[in-house]
Image (cartoon, rainbow, N blue to C red):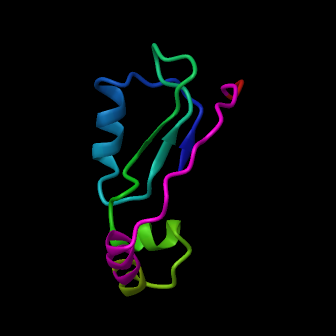
Amino acid sequence: METDKEVNPKLEMTAIQKLLDGGPPILFNKVKGYTNARLATNVMASDRIIAKMFGLKDRKASSSRSTRASFSPSRPRSWTRRPARKS
């Protein structure tokens, strides 16, 4: 779920997320007071959502993949900065 409506990060965003507890992740594209910020909430709400984010077919695959990753982590990557997305 995604919204372009400006939201207050202190109370309004939390209230919206609380109303949708157990629901889908939400991406807030306009955060009041933070012109170049986007904020995602509820991304780790359930193992089903996590599996879907990583393109895994079921929850069990998600669990075994994270266990393998914790024992053999990948090397850190450096990222180049990109300009903020204009709305």
Residue 48 pos. (x, y %) = 40, 74
Q: Which residues are magenta?
A: 64-84
Residue 85 pos. (x, y %) = 69, 29
Residue 50 pos. (x, y %) = 42, 67
Position of 79 with respect to 27 (left or right) is: right
Residue drawn at x 72%, y 24% is 86
In this view, the residue in front, 77 or 63, is 77
In this view, the residue in front, 56 or 67, is 67
Q: Is residue 81 shown in magenta?
A: yes
The C terminus, quarter of image: top right
Residue 47 pos. (x, y %) = 35, 71
Q: Main secondary structure of the magenta part?
A: loop
Res 72 quadrant in image: bottom left
Res 22 quadrant in image: bottom left
In this view, the residue in front, 19 or 50, is 50
Position of 36 with respect to 26 (left or right) is: right
